[in-house]
Amino acid sequence: MALSQDQIARYSRHLLLPEVGVKGQEKLCNAKVLCIGTGGLGSPLGLYLAAAGIGTMGLVDFDVVDKSNLQRQIMHGESTVGKLKVDSARTRLADMNSDAKIITYNTRLSSENALEIFKDYDIIVDGTDNFPTRYLANDAAVLLGKPYIYGCILRFEGQASVFHAKEGPCYRCLYPEPPPPGLVPSCAEGGVLGILPGIIGLIQATEVIKLILNKGETLIGRLMIFDALGMKFREMRLRKDEDCPICGDSPTIRKLIDYEQFCGIAQEEKANFEDTTMEISAVDVKRMLDDGEKFTLVDVREPSEYDICRIDGSVLVPLGQIEAMRPQNLNGLSQGDVIILHCKAGVRSLKAAKALKKMGFKNVRSMAGGIEEWSKKIDSSMPRY
Amino acid sequence: MITVKYFASLRSLAGKEEDLFNLGSETTLERLSEEISKTAPKIGEMMRGKKVMISVNHEVVVPGAVIRDGDEVALLPPFSGGC
């Protein structure tokens, strides 16, 4: 399809680059790119790819826009809080470039739908936030022989690479085994600097454009690592694992598997279910406080979270100090005390309760739902973050 | 000396960004992981369980790799944030 007069004016700065030119811009306008996730990474890369003239953009997301997204998810705004992310993104991208054909999938990517969704696209870009979806996206891309543009972020650090099993390693060559569930914090637990997805997302977008143009040196076989605090870019040369179960010489994975199970999420949920005996509801904790019962309320969040909000009378002992299993770190807690632990949502305090039990504490419970539940059920003036 | 650089969550597990080890002119990753385990057992365990990516002089290596005096070893755990 030849460029229209309008398009020539719009893309003139691209047309002036010999590496792009009319031919290159036509390639961009005919390209089909799938973005998994329209959040931190998906926002900047989606916006710039639409601006660059990518002809067809697929967007997969099942979430709705939350106020806590706006610190970094620049695709969305105050006017779309509470709306479906794919709808919010479609409106924004259509405004950015009405040439782009936007196809939305308001669904969670799964083993059942991934191949069907991926098959219509040239390039898959990963902006997800969890391990099962990353392994799923990698495997689906390998099975279909499509390039998979990887990016991830946490706190002040990010990584990006291009996995294209025909020419180099895949995600499984780097990390054959997922980490045990709960070991690696998500951005919701660990925090993330708002600009970080901007930097990593645009490295991904750059690679998408280079792959379409077939110009420059891509990140195939290289992992880019960025540290915002040290302001350092580092690079590692990757190797294809000949024993890789999906892209190696004799692959054992020939179709998509159950990724929740692979990443241990199912087992984790089962274990959590069995742990409910160690939990107490926020309502019961409030009643104990009102009745003047003697117990110590321990807040196991981080000091930065304690500064945001706290329940009156709580003692701060971050989970990390409890898990280090050194009694001198426990801010004066002793084994005979009646202890109720709480955190933001109830996950960390349950871990802390188990660790204390191992250390010989007898009467330890974790407040289910954490300070979020407290805010919902007991005191609505308690900020949620 | 072998320099070990910790990335992301490994920094808080190790309590530092970097470590130096004197393990003679030539050693193995297995031996290095045992040495790291003395102060940070979780990291040693993750190295042996293939849960971290290990590079030597900016190049990713396989578990049996030999490392030499003066090498820089980087340990990079997976992380998954994107939202």
Image (cartoon, coloured by chain):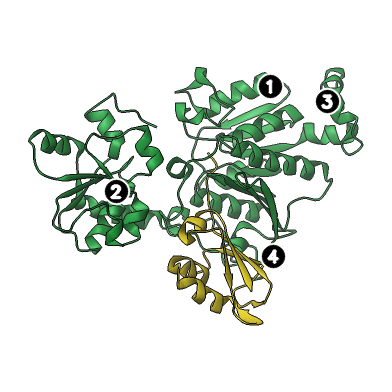
Chain colours: A green, B yellow
Q: Secondary structure at mark 1?
A: helix
Name the disc covering residue A96, or none: 1
Kind of residue sitting beneath label 3: Tyr
Q: Position of residue A83 (x, y in %)?
A: 47, 23
Q: Which residue sits at x=50%, y=71%?
A: B36
Position of the C terminus of chain A, as image quadrant, is top left
Lower position in the chain sequence, tag 2 or tag 3? 3
Mark closer to the observer (2, 3)? 2
Kind of residue sitting beneath label 2: Ser
Please determine whether, in this image, residue A280 is positioned above or below residue A286.
below
Q: Secondary structure at mark 2?
A: helix
Are labels 2 and 4 assigned to the same chain? yes
List the residue tagged with mark 2. Answer: A349
**A201 or B24, which is in the foreground?**
B24
Marks 2/4: CA–CA distance: 40 Å
Q: Chain of mark 3?
A: A
List the residue tagged with mark 4. Answer: A239
List the residue tagged with mark 3. Answer: A11
Lower position in the chain sequence, tag 4 or tag 1? 1
Q: Which residue sits at x=15%, y=54%?
A: A363
Lower position in the chain sequence, tag 1 or tag 3? 3
Marks 4/1: CA–CA distance: 39 Å
| Direction from residue A48 to residue A183 in the image, left or right | left
Q: Which residue sits at x=28%, y=40%?
A: A369
Asked whether the residues under the numbered discs 1 and 3 touch, taking CB atoms below 8 Å apart as contact, a structural biologist would say no
Marks 1/2: CA–CA distance: 44 Å
Asked whether the residues under the numbered discs 2 and 3 touch, taking CB atoms below 8 Å apart as contact, a structural biologist would say no
From where the camera sits, is residue A66 visible?
A: no
